[in-house]
Image (cartoon, rainbow, N blue to C red):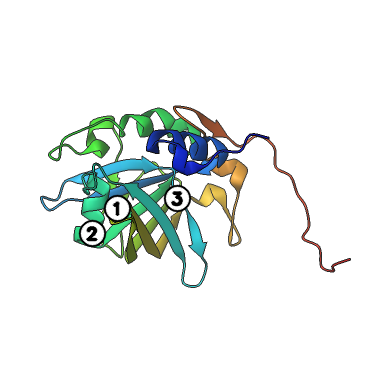
Amino acid sequence: MKSINPKDLSSKDNYKLLSGSVIPRPIAFVTSLNEEGILNAAPFSFFNMVAGTPPLIVLSVGRIKGEIKKHTGRNILQQKQFVVHILDTDLLEKMNQTSAPYGDDVSEVERVGFTPIESTDIAVPGVKEAKIRLECQLFQHIPLEEDGKCQNDLFIGKVVKYHIDEQIYDNGRILADQLDPIARLAGPNYAKLSETIFLERPTKGE
């Protein structure tokens, strides 16, 4: 067993070890609006759910040299709203294209050929092709600081409306096989669901 102190590693090397260890990760495909009304879209794998009551999701967005440069981070702070999508593997190529370094005046949604769709409870549109859309309002913003420096921002979003494709919805449950979600591994590697393991939770301790 190899033991490594994170303090002995560069930021890049820590990222490699963490992103290669914490796998597979779900991907949030996030749409947000800038001040000019341009619809931005980008994928993030530092993402998960954190509570059911209230329904909360969490998203970590990295800074660039300590500044909030990424469109998603800036837009969420300005508008206090965003949409999280869970995309299926058929949309992987389009999703990947949105991660290119487009300028502020370019909508990644339009550039890669996604179809914008109006939200019902917030002003930020979503993407019609997604089987799941979660309309979110900003619940809490936490700059992640250490030694007076901040390299990441944690955004906690409160889900205010679910939009779910009827083909993957069954009596209050999501059909994972029908959803066929994209998962993230390390580097430029992705994964999909292969085998589902059913295991009842124990009702008594021994």
Residue displayed at 16% across by 36% down: 106
Which residue type does callout 3 highlight?
A: Phe
The residue lying furthest to the bottom in this view is 53
Q: Secondary structure at mark 2?
A: helix
Judged by depth in the image, the label closer to the viewer, 1 or 3, is 1
Q: Could you classify mark 1 by the number of other residues whose Cα lies within 10 Å: few (under 14), some (14-19), or many (20 or more)?
A: some
User: In the rendering, which numbered label is found on residue 150?
Assistant: 1
Counting from the top left corner in percent of width and height, residue 191 is at: 55, 32
Residue displayed at 27% across by 63% down: 122
Q: Secondary structure at mark 1?
A: strand
Q: Dividing the image into 4 quarters, which one contains the N terminus?
A: top right
Name the foreground residue: 6 vs 126: 6
Q: Secondary structure at mark 3?
A: strand
User: Is there a contact, CB below 8 Å, between mark 1 and mark 3?
Assistant: no
Q: Could you classify mark 3 by the number of other residues whose Cα lies within 10 Å: few (under 14), some (14-19), or many (20 or more)?
A: many
Which residue type does callout 1 highlight?
A: Cys
N-terminal label among 1 and 3: 3
Q: Dividing the image into 4 quarters, which one contains the C terminus?
A: bottom right
Looking at the image, is 161 positioned above or below residue 1?
below
Which of the 4 image quarters holds residue 42?
A: top left
Looking at the image, is 50 positioned above or below residue 149?
below
N-terminal label among 3 and 2: 3
Gap between marks 2 and 1, in whole Å? 16 Å
Which of the 4 image quarters holds residue 83?
A: bottom left
Q: Could you classify mark 2 by the number of other residues whose Cα lies within 10 Å: few (under 14), some (14-19), or many (20 or more)?
A: some
Name the foreground residue: 3 vs 42: 3
Gap between marks 1 and 3, in whole Å? 19 Å
Gap between marks 3 and 2, in whole Å? 17 Å
Q: Which residue is mark 2?
A: 77
Which residue type does callout 2 highlight?
A: Leu
Residue displayed at 35% across by 45% down: 128
Q: Which residue is mark 3?
A: 47
